[in-house]
Image: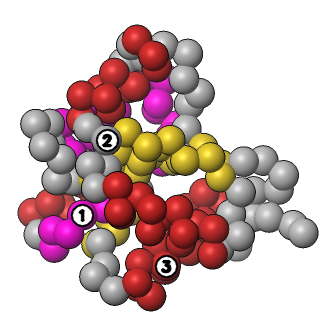
Amino acid sequence: MKHALGTSVARILVIEDNASDVFLLERALNQHDLRFELVHLLSGREALAFIRRQGAYADAAIPNLILVDLNLSKYTGEDILREIRSARHLGGVSVCVWSSSRSRRDEALLKDLGVAQFITKPSGLDQFMEIGKIIKDLLAGPRAA
């Protein structure tokens, strides 16, 4: 079977404090036949350690995609995004934000921070499964015309 990314496995870093959302994300990715390794960080503190390559994350592999929840406790998604953008080793990594927020201000701010995609977290399971397709398309990269 041929995958969008060939035989490689996509490394996806998810910074999300809601384990249920991560469970649903994993189901959505599996539904779209994507070969992936999911690294889940539950807090902004863990995310900052990962981004700064500190402690347990000193030798962590660079992900192909980073998915950040905008509404984290203690550190905001915006704090995390600014840190990602200042980390030279993450310069070529696509960053996606997902949030239950539908704020135009958030969307405008995220565009300024170079976010590849803003995903509004859906309330229904069927819509949640569509996130798998969005992420698969992002990982496949731009298509030649």
According to the image, label 3 marks what residue?
129
| Cα gap from disc 2 to disc 3, whole angstroms | 21 Å
Q: Residues within 10 Å of mark 2 (few under 14, many from 20)?
A: some
Q: Coloured how?
A: secondary structure
Q: Amino acid at mark 1?
A: Ser
According to the image, label 2 marks what residue?
42
Disc with the residue nearer the chain's start (3 vs 1)? 1
Numbered tag placed on residue 99 in the rendering: 1
Residue 14, image x, y percentages: 42, 47
Quarter of the view holding residue 86: top left
Q: Residues within 10 Å of mark 1 (few under 14, many from 20)?
A: some
Relative to 75, is 108 above or below? below
Q: Are marks 3 and 1 in contact (CB under 8 Å)?
A: no
Residue at horizontal 13%, vertical 43%?
73
Query: For this view, does 60 lie left or right of residue 15?
Result: right
Relative to 54, is 24 above or below? below
Relative to 53, is 34 above or below? below
Residue at horizontal 58%, vertical 66%?
29
Residue at horizontal 26%, vertical 49%?
17
Query: For this view, does 37 lie left or right of residue 79?
Result: right
Number of the front mark, 1 or 2: 2
Number of the front mark, 2 or 3: 2
Q: Amino acid at mark 2?
A: Leu
Dot 3 falls on a residue whose secondary structure is helix
Number of the front mark, 3 or 1: 3
Disc with the residue nearer the chain's start (2 vs 3)? 2
Identify the image quadrant of the C terminus: bottom right
Residue 97 in sight from this viewpoint: no
Q: Amino acid at mark 3?
A: Met
Identify the image quadrant of the N terminus: bottom right
| Magenta region | 77-102
Residue 43 falls within the magenta-colored stretch: no
